[in-house]
Image (spheres, helix red, strand yellow):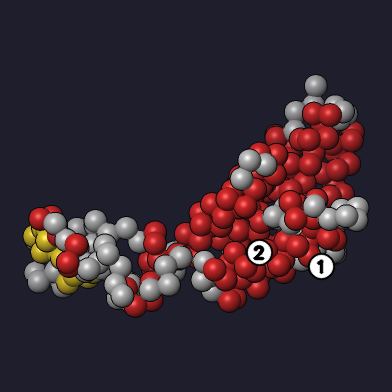
């Protein structure tokens, strides 16, 4: 079975087109299913400008279909995964806008912290989107919901989601290691965990400040005791408004 987008039986008149080589300007003829083509004039390997590589983050045939992709594009597959994870999170919570909003806001903060700290954005953002994924099943339990229950359920559901999207095993395990104790950080956490922790703490501080306005002293104490990165601490200082 071939992807319909790459099967010539489904092609239309624009399936073959010309594109200029970015190196020398020579016209290069592309078939729509070609990932790259070598310029006959200068020898540069040119990437197909009309091919959408986003499907490579989840399609089970990606390795067969895109095996000719240059290393720099294959390296982006993990980064594309975060968008698929975000969609699965929203599908899971459906109309539970509170939990969708929490995951989205935490991921937004994480997206600002991770690059500043030199963490792995794909791991940090996937963990941020999934950090509260265990809230809904845990809420349906007959016993009082604890953070430990949410963490355990998040690991179970997180594994299901990441494996169904065919995330790399190494990436899956790194994300699950964060979800395993995201509400119970230890003293010796890795950089990816620290970024998610700080993003979550910014969200918590904003909620607390909205319910009962914090004093500057209370905010300063939280910044020193709860945050693990300088970038997270700085972002929290500008994101939590003290009146």
Q: Regarding mark 2 in the picture, which secondary structure is present there?
A: helix
Residue with the mark numbered 1: 188
Q: Regarding mark 1 in the picture, which secondary structure is present there?
A: loop
**How many other residues sit within 10 Å of disc 1, few (<14), some (14-19) or many (≥20)?**
few
The answer to the question of whether label 2 and label 1 lie on touching residues, with beta carbons closer than 8 A, is no
Marking on residue 111: none
Q: Quadrant of the N terminus?
A: bottom left
Image quadrant assignment for residue 18: bottom left
Total labels drawn: 2
Residue with the mark numbered 2: 158
The residue depicted at 75 percent of the width and 55 percent of the height is 137
The residue depicted at 81 percent of the width and 67 percent of the height is 188
**Residue toward you, 90 or 142:** 142
**Residue toward you, 72 or 177:** 177
Q: Quadrant of the C terminus?
A: top right
Instruction: Tell me if residue 167 comes above or below residue 151 in the rendering.
Output: below
Question: Is 7 left, or right, of 73 in this rendering?
Answer: left
The residue depicted at 83 percent of the width and 60 percent of the height is 149
Question: Is 37 left, or right, of 142 in this rendering?
Answer: left
Image quadrant assignment for residue 37: bottom left
Indicate which label's residue lies in the foreground, 2 or 1. 2
Kindly tell me whether residue 166 is visible in this rendering.
yes
Where is residue 205? Give x, y as percent: 80, 38
The residue depicted at 71 percent of the width and 67 percent of the height is 156
Instruction: Tell me if residue 84 comes above or below residue 200 in the rendering.
Output: below
């Amino acid at each position: 079975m071939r992807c319909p987008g790459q099967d010539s039986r489904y092609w239309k008149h624009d399936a073959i087109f010309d594109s200029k080589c970015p190196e020398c300007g020579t016209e290069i003829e592309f078939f729509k299913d070609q990932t790259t083509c070598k310029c006959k004039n200068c020898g540069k390997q040119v990437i197909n400008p009309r091919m959408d590589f986003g499907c490579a983050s989840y399609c089970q045939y990606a390795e067969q279909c895109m095996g000719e992709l240059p290393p720099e594009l294959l390296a982006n597959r993990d980064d594309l995964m975060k968008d698929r994870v975000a969609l699965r999170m929203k599908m899971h919570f459906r109309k539970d806008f509170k939990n969708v909003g929490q995951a989205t806001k935490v991921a937004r903060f994480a997206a600002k912290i991770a690059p500043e700290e030199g963490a792995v954005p794909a791991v940090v953002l996937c963990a941020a989107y999934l950090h509260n994924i265990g809230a809904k099943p845990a809420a349906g339990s007959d016993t009082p919901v604890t953070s430990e229950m949410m963490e355990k359920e998040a690991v179970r559901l997180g594994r299901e989601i990441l494996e169904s999207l065919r995330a790399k095993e190494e990436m899956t395990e790194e994300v699950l290691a964060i979800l395993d104790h995201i509400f119970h950080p230890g003293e010796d956490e890795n950089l990816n965990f620290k970024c998610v922790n700080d993003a979550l703490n910014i969200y918590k501080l904003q909620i607390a400040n909205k319910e009962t306005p914090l004093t500057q002293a209370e905010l300063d104490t939280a910044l020193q005791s709860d945050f693990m990165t300088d970038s997270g601490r700085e972002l929290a200082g500008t994101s939590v408004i003290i009146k």
